[in-house]
Protein backbone atom coordinates (compact mmCIF):
# COMPACT_ATOMS: atom_id res chain seq x y z
CA UNK A 1 0.00 0.00 0.00
CA UNK A 2 1.42 3.45 -0.81
CA UNK A 3 2.49 5.55 2.19
CA UNK A 4 -0.11 8.21 1.39
CA UNK A 5 -2.89 5.64 1.36
CA UNK A 6 -1.72 4.25 4.70
CA UNK A 7 -1.74 7.80 6.11
CA UNK A 8 -5.28 8.45 4.84
CA UNK A 9 -6.55 5.13 6.20
CA UNK A 10 -5.12 5.94 9.63
CA UNK A 11 -6.01 9.65 9.50
CA UNK A 12 -2.38 10.57 10.09
CA UNK A 13 -0.35 13.37 8.49
CA UNK A 14 1.65 12.04 5.52
CA UNK A 15 5.02 13.22 6.88
CA UNK A 16 4.35 11.52 10.23
CA UNK A 17 3.35 8.29 8.48
CA UNK A 18 6.44 8.37 6.27
CA UNK A 19 8.63 8.72 9.36
CA UNK A 20 6.85 5.87 11.14
CA UNK A 21 7.05 3.59 8.09
CA UNK A 22 10.77 4.36 7.75
CA UNK A 23 11.28 3.34 11.38
CA UNK A 24 9.35 0.11 10.82
CA UNK A 25 11.39 -0.55 7.67
CA UNK A 26 14.69 -0.07 9.54
CA UNK A 27 13.39 -2.48 12.19
CA UNK A 28 12.65 -5.01 9.42
CA UNK A 29 8.91 -5.13 10.14
CA UNK A 30 7.87 -3.70 6.77
CA UNK A 31 9.43 -3.88 3.31
CA UNK A 32 9.14 -1.29 0.60
CA UNK A 33 9.54 -1.00 -3.15
CA UNK A 34 9.40 1.97 -5.47
CA UNK A 35 6.71 2.12 -8.15
CA UNK A 36 7.10 5.24 -10.23
CA UNK A 37 6.84 8.12 -7.73
CA UNK A 38 5.27 6.02 -4.97
CA UNK A 39 6.84 3.84 -2.33
CA UNK A 40 4.73 0.76 -1.70
CA UNK A 41 4.94 -0.70 1.80
CA UNK A 42 4.08 -4.24 2.85
CA UNK A 43 4.23 -6.01 6.19
CA UNK A 44 7.04 -8.53 6.62
CA UNK A 45 5.01 -11.21 8.36
CA UNK A 46 8.01 -13.44 9.04
CA UNK A 47 9.73 -10.64 10.95
CA UNK A 48 6.52 -9.68 12.78
CA UNK A 49 6.02 -13.31 13.79
CA UNK A 50 9.62 -13.52 15.00
CA UNK A 51 9.15 -10.33 17.04
CA UNK A 52 5.92 -11.62 18.58
CA UNK A 53 7.63 -14.92 19.40
CA UNK A 54 10.50 -13.08 21.10
CA UNK A 55 8.15 -10.85 23.05
CA UNK A 56 6.00 -13.77 24.15
CA UNK A 57 9.05 -15.75 25.26
CA UNK A 58 10.85 -12.86 26.91
CA UNK A 59 7.98 -10.83 28.35
CA UNK A 60 5.63 -13.64 29.37
CA UNK A 61 8.45 -15.48 31.17
CA UNK A 62 6.85 -18.86 30.63
CA UNK A 63 3.39 -17.75 31.80
CA UNK A 64 1.27 -18.57 28.75
CA UNK A 65 -1.87 -16.99 30.23
CA UNK A 66 -0.29 -13.53 30.02
CA UNK A 67 0.30 -13.83 26.28
CA UNK A 68 -2.79 -15.85 25.37
CA UNK A 69 -4.55 -12.97 23.55
CA UNK A 70 -1.47 -12.37 21.36
CA UNK A 71 -1.17 -16.08 20.62
CA UNK A 72 -4.81 -16.24 19.59
CA UNK A 73 -4.39 -13.26 17.28
CA UNK A 74 -1.19 -14.63 15.75
CA UNK A 75 -2.88 -17.98 15.09
CA UNK A 76 -5.87 -16.33 13.42
CA UNK A 77 -5.98 -16.74 9.65
CA UNK A 78 -8.94 -14.44 9.03
CA UNK A 79 -8.86 -10.64 8.88
CA UNK A 80 -12.15 -10.69 10.79
CA UNK A 81 -10.51 -12.24 13.86
CA UNK A 82 -10.08 -10.19 16.98
CA UNK A 83 -8.20 -11.35 20.07
CA UNK A 84 -10.08 -12.57 23.08
CA UNK A 85 -9.32 -10.17 25.90
CA UNK A 86 -10.76 -12.43 28.62
CA UNK A 87 -7.30 -13.69 29.60
CA UNK A 88 -5.59 -10.31 29.39
CA UNK A 89 -6.41 -9.24 32.94
Image: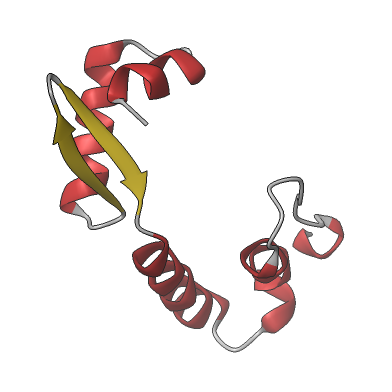
Pick the quarter of the image with the C terminus.
bottom right
Q: Residue at 87%, 59% (x, y): give it.
A: 86
Furthest-right residue in this view: 86
**Image vertical order of residue 47 relative to residue 44, above or below:** below
Q: Position of residue 18 (x, y in %)?
A: 22, 25
Is residue 35 shown left or right of residue 12? left
User: In front here: 53 or 1?
Assistant: 1
Res 29 quadrant in image: bottom left
Res 73 quadrant in image: bottom right
Res 72 quadrant in image: bottom right
Q: Residue at 57%, 77% (x, y): give it.
A: 60
Is residue 54 shown left or right of residue 64? left
User: In front here: 70 or 49?
Assistant: 49
**Image vertical order of residue 42 relative to residue 56, above or below:** above
User: In front here: 55 or 25?
Assistant: 25
Q: Residue at 72%, 63% (x, y): give it.
A: 69
Q: Position of residue 7 (x, y in %)?
A: 38, 18
Furthest-bottom residue in this view: 62
Is residue 7 shown left or right of residue 73? left
Q: Position of residue 8 (x, y in %)?
A: 44, 13
Q: Residue at 21%, 47% (x, y): give it.
A: 25
Pick the quarter of the image with the N terminus.
top left
Q: Position of residue 35 (x, y in %)?
A: 17, 30
Amino acid sequence: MPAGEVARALDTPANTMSTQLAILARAGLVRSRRESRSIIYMADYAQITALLGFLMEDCCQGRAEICAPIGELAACKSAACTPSMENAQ
